[in-house]
Image (cartoon, rainbow, N blue to C red):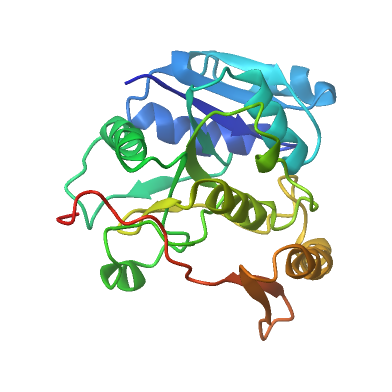
Amino acid sequence: MTYKIAIPSYKRSLLCNNQTLKMLHDNAIDPSLIYVFVVEQEFDIYTANLNPKWYNAIIIGQKGIGNQRQFIRDYFTEGEYIVSLDDDIVNVDFSLTEYVKLDDFFNDAFIECVKQKSFIWGVYPVNNKFFREKQKPLTTCLNFIVGAFYGFINRPKCDELCLHIGDEKEDVEQTILYFKKDGIVLRFNKISFKTKYYNSNGGLGGLKDRIYDAKINAEMLEALYPQYGKIKVRKNGVYEFVLKKLQGVPLDNKNI
């Protein structure tokens, strides 16, 4: 099964090279599968700083992660299998599974998508082994599919998957939209990854800006999708939109 890897990146060329691209290289992922999406003003910087042996192409896309995700969907063709990774992934944790090779997991994830009639898969969003030990290996309910590490079967012309809110919490809305469309999102709960959130040097923005944006977008999510979740304010003042565990399409294989 052939898939492609899309890495949206903004103002973090060295980090992209030294973390996600290096991680993929260390896991023997074929560089011809890897595409890095940047803004036009930074094309030359990324060209200078990325190891040319570790990727296929640097593509000029759109500014803003929501716009970039839509651009990535439009860039690839209907039905292609796409893995989307943030630019700051250090490693993938398979310690609670039998997986050794990252390529094997990517392939199996898409095979499972086809089998279960899901168009998106994700992994556990928190890099905490204790939490993952208590989870079912695979679920189909409305579980959050974190935008830092997920895969999808491309449907670029599907207007029902178009995002409406800003860049903060766009992956929450994306999860809801896929669930609304298909009645299922697959999540591999025994697998997680190490990355960095709220990095002020590029990426999705600094912590203060994200706290403000999180409030605005959480309120938008509540207005747009009240039946799918509710607002929760954490002790540090960050607004979250917590998804309801709505029942998904039952798994075909009860032994999973």
Relative image position of residue 63 (x, y in whole percent): 81, 35
Asked whether residue 38 appears in the rendered view, the answer is yes
Could you tell me which residue is drawn at 37 percent across and 24 percent down? 29
Relative image position of residue 33 (x, y in whole percent): 46, 18
Relative image position of residue 240 (x, y in whole percent): 67, 72
Towards the viewer: 89 or 3:
3
Question: Taking 59 as reference, is 188 left or right?
Answer: left
Could you tell me which residue is drawn at 50 percent across and 21 percent down? 34
Q: Is residue 165 above or below residue 110?
A: below
- State the quadrant of the C terminus: bottom left
Question: Taking 218 as reference, is 185 left or right?
Answer: left
Question: Taking 180 as reference, is 109 left or right?
Answer: left
Relative image position of residue 151 (x, y in whole percent): 47, 38
Q: Is residue 60 above or below residue 13?
A: above
Residue 42 quadrant: top right
Could you tell me which residue is drawn at 42 percent across and 42 percent down? 118
Could you tell me which residue is drawn at 53 percent across and 36 percent down? 84
Q: Is residue 1 above or below residue 183?
A: above
- State the quadrant of the N terminus: top left
Question: Taking 218 as reference, is 20 left or right?
Answer: left
User: How many marks can you see?
Assistant: 0
Asked whether residue 48 appears in the rendered view, the answer is no
